[in-house]
Amino acid sequence: MIGRGVACALGVALWMAGSALAATADHGKFKELQGPFASGEDVTRACLSCHTEAARQVMATRHWTWEYENPADGSKLGKKTMLNGFCIGDKSNEAFCQSCHVGYGWKDDSFDFSAEEKVDCLACHNTGGYKKLSGLAGHPAYERMEWPPGSGKFVEATDLARVAQHVGHTSRETCGTCHYYGGGGDGVKHGDLDSSLNAAPRELDVHMAQDGLNFACSDCHQAEEHKVPGSRIAMTAADPHGPLVRGQKSERNPATCQSCHGDKPHEESLLHAGRLNAHTDTLACQACHIPSFARGGVPTKMGWDWSTAGRMDQNGKPFQKKDDKGHVIYDSKKGDFVLGENVVPDYLWFNGKVTYTTIDTRIDPSAEVAINTFHGGPDDPDARIWPVKIFHGKQPYDVEHRTLLVPHTATPDDTAFWYNFDWPKALAAGAAATGQPYSGKFDFAATRMIWPITHMVAPKERAVACHECHSRDGRLAGVEGIYVPGRDGLPLLRTAGWLAALAALAGVLIHGALRILTHYRGK
Amino acid sequence: MNEHRPVRRIYVFKRYERFWHWSQAVLIVFMMLTGFEIAGAYENFGFRRAVEYHTLAAWALLVLWAFTIFWQFTTGEWRQYIPTLKKVDAMVRYYAWGIFRGAPHPYHKTALKKHNPLQRLAYLALLAVVSPVIWVSGLFYLFYAWWGDYGVDRWLELEWVATAHTAGAFMMLVFFIVHVYLTTTGHTVFAHIKAMITGWEDEEPEGDPARSGRSLQGGDDPARSGMP
């Protein structure tokens, strides 16, 4: 196992070093990239003059469309319309949120999704010096500007020619620019993805460790024609197959653990190998190999209460409250946060199918509203027990229509909540943008959201120990449909067994006492 | 107390038999300790270690049994376990009544018949009921990882196996408690244990007069054979 690990690491290291050394083109020497470039679109035109198909490939992916049809129920999802319990929704906030769109200029519905020069190649292929600023609808700063507006901090103009001449493979940094910061900050949403992975030590992630395998995201999420495999809406929850051999043609998701390790990877000890491999029929690899999430020092949001947003300090100004570690736990713009670090996941049966509450879904605000639901059960062959982050929110809904609402928050105007702290205006503007009916009456509903935990894989010696599940109140305490030695057992049998043992003990003690008694009386 | 009389000693437990008994005793006690921990009754070694030790002890016991079965049949000792109902009532009456009155033991142990009728029944129950329950369920438990390969998972559930195994374990625990207590019912408290260690047991001569001054603490009473 160790030998194979080292060989694998060596192979990957050689391959990565090799690909850098073996590159046959130095983009810095291309006359097309000498610039100067006035805008991102100019750079894209230069890229496309050689990489003729690249834009069309990107435009076919959900990185571009922000649309996704859920294979589980055919519902239309994707960032464009989806709801979450964090920043809630994209509509009416495009200029802010679309700093994570792989394009330039999507600030409202007038965006042209067929314009190839609007594709942002640099977002994913820069090797530094490039940042799409929130508020600029996907553009970087083209001139020195104050950012965030009113902060007194300034951002220098992006040297587009320099960035273009130094393009390279995607990296943890480029993917992380968006995927770490979903929900408005580092580590907010996922819990297993945050900026600590950029310089991950081995304990944090055995694959991405800088001093180890140093994987980029794309080492597992191997894209073809710019289509990046792996989705948290349609996941591969079970992959009961052996490892894929390099070069093997396969329809399987290349981002699963099993696509490299196979589904029976344990071989270290005669006493345990078989037993651990049998566990893979029930458990996702992640269940044992990610003992906790948010391990890298960046907290993740476990709860977010929008209902307390809008409070002002004694000077009538918005304020922030921080915890002992300096992390914000209240913000007038956003409300109260519950933060978590080194969080032990919850566990549930999951077959990869997720369904979502959308802006059309009628909710029951008397109970916690499930923004998403993970499907699967113990009798489902595609289901395994997965570790998840369960997030609890409190967010606005329409009291009459019983739908969750998308507030207009982030782009400065006289309806945006972050600039006016006026819920009625913000919700009306949001509803106008989503096109959903809005009664004008709103309240806050408790919501819940589930996030699969699949990154931050620990070294094997840090895997979850047996007793953490094989005990009465262990990690799997609430998981049904399995018999867990040490957790389960017929209470009746246990009671009867101990009673029988007690009766036997009492019997022999009484018998013995009588013997002693009659012995001395007999004397 | 009584006048000193020469006591006949018989060689009841042969060397292998004693080795077998004590190593089996150690293994079974150890397996109860680790087994009840695996079942979640308490914590000592930790679940992982408990499973490892329990598994190793199971293999050790299997090896021991393989040799012992061979020994039982080559020596003919297996006959010691043939059950009989003769004198069972006398044995029951003795434990329920006579033992408190200092009555003589109704069974005379010899090298050819070293187990009294109650013992034979108890050991037969152990061999025919408790052991099969524990071993069959235990082996299925041990090889759970391979159920899928042989289609066992289509007709068997881990919960049933675990339940049977736990039930067997409780039966073994009850046996263990009673068994240990009954070792003290020899002519002295430690007479039976001594016999199981040295192999030699004092034998009660025929026509022994009724005694009243039997000592629990040891002494020179004529021996009776009990049920260890």
Image (cartoon, coloured by chain):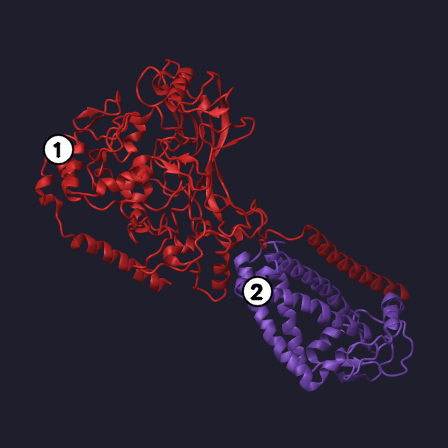
Chain colours: A red, B purple
Of all chains, the one bearing label 2 is B
* Marks 2 and 1 belong to one chain: no
Secondary structure category for the residue under label 2 = helix
Q: Is residue A205 visible?
A: yes
Q: Which mark, residue B142?
A: 2
Secondary structure category for the residue under label 1 = loop
Screen quadrant of the C terminus of chain A: bottom right
- The residue that mark 1 highlights is A37
Q: Is residue A344 visible?
A: no
Query: Dots 2 and 1: beta carbons under 8 Å?
Result: no
Locate residue A484 relative to residue A440 in the image: left or right: right
Screen quadrant of the N terminus of chain A: bottom left
Between residue B71 and residue A492, name the one nearer to us: A492
A499 lies above or below B115:
above
In front: mark 2 or mark 1? Answer: 1
Amino acid on which the number 1 mark rests in the picture: Phe
Q: Which mark, residue A428?
A: none
Locate residue A420 relative to residue A122 in the image: left or right: right
A423 lies above or below A360:
above
The image shows residue A185 at horizontal and vertical percentages of: 34, 32
